Image (cartoon, rainbow, N blue to C red):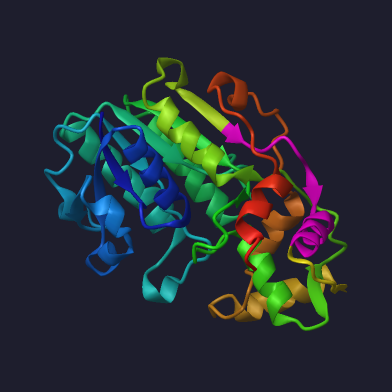
Amino acid sequence: MNVFLTGATGYVGNKILSALINSKHHVSVLVRNDSANKIPDNFKSGIKIVKGDVTNHKSYAGQLSGCDAIIYLPGLIREFPERGITFKQIHFDSVKNLIDSSKREGVKRFLLMSANGVKPNASTKYLRTKYDAEEYLKQSGLSWTIFRPSVIFGDENEGRNNFISVIIDLLNQMPLFVPVIGNGEYRFQPISIENVADAFVKSLEMGKTISKTYCMCGNEIFTYNQLVNIILKIINRKKIKLHVPVWEMKLLAKLFDKYEWFPVTHDQITMLLEENICRGGTDFFEELNIEPIYLENGLKVFLKNI
């Protein structure tokens, strides 16, 4: 199958690109001029690199013709409106333009990376803009599949930030303590990056996944406190949890949201407290014939050298 992949240089994108190549798909990868070097050299001989940007639909005009499927992965963790980097731009406008281009150039299949917790009238712009993209895709007439992963773990040693690597950075930066927002009892249902990649690639040729939205969570639920304890155990460290009041962190986040050095935004705190679990179950493992990878086993593979 000829697949047009966006976001291939990102955390999840790199793993999906590898899975697509291993499954013998023909892959065209959209990358910015300054990001082409992020594609591993051993991948380059088996793919077509398209220089362009998801925010500029003219940059990839004509490149979708002959493709069987589009995979859209890009997402922002935080926005910087003063630099023109916004959730609306990446989560909705760029998706809309790619959907419209797909229809003009005859592509029928579209896979979208969304996020667990997406719903109408969500509490944050992050989730609201992803919801808008989902709705536009559903009304597009394309054969669509939407994936909503919870927090993703795996490949922590690959130099790409994810939820677990951020916790590890906090543990490394603080000599005796690890800061915890509030009581730390808010819950997560992490999913392995390998399970996410498998789901995307398998769904390409599974007709039963068309017009379906999959909430993607692992089979285990942990509080934030438990996640910290598991990581400390694996990396053989001891730290004291320093619980910071929610109101204090929200105040600081409001003041320092626009600075990249501040570790968390006001919206991220809001979503943290709302929890990140799949309340509707995890049926996709069985439906897509995927063997779930459990958190502690998965982390031991990637954290053994830390």
Q: Nearer the viewer, residue 70 or 301?
A: 301
- Looking at the rendered image, the quarter that the N terminus falls into is top left
In the figure, is residue 194 to the left or right of 31? right
Q: Which x, y percent locates residue 216? A: 60, 36
- Asked if one can make out residue 46 in the rendered structure from this viewpoint, the answer is yes
Q: Nearer the viewer, residue 79 or 280?
A: 280
- Asked if one can make out residue 54 in the rendered structure from this viewpoint, the answer is no
What segment carries the magenta color? 215-234
Up the image or down, 89 lies above or below 107; here it is below
| Furthest-top residue in this view | 208
Instruction: Kindly identify the residue that appears in the image at 37 percent across and 70 percent down.
Output: 84
In the figure, is residue 231 to the left or right of 17? right
* Res 59 → quadrant: bottom left
Q: Which x, y percent locates residue 94? A: 33, 51
Q: Nearer the viewer, residue 68 or 256?
A: 68
Q: Which x, y percent locates residue 212? A: 49, 24
Instruction: Kindly identify the residue that appears in the image at 22 percent across and 46 percent down.
Output: 47
Q: Nearer the viewer, residue 21 or 242?
A: 21
In the figure, is residue 152 to the left or right of 84? right
Instruction: Kindly identify the residue that appears in the image at 40 percent across and 52 percent down.
Output: 14
In the figure, is residue 50 to the left or right of 23? left
* Res 112 → quadrant: top left
- Looking at the rendered image, the quarter that the C terminus falls into is bottom right
Q: Is 229 one of the magenta-colored residues?
A: yes
* Res 234 → quadrant: bottom right
Q: Is 222 one of the magenta-colored residues?
A: yes
Q: Which x, y percent locates residue 237? A: 80, 71
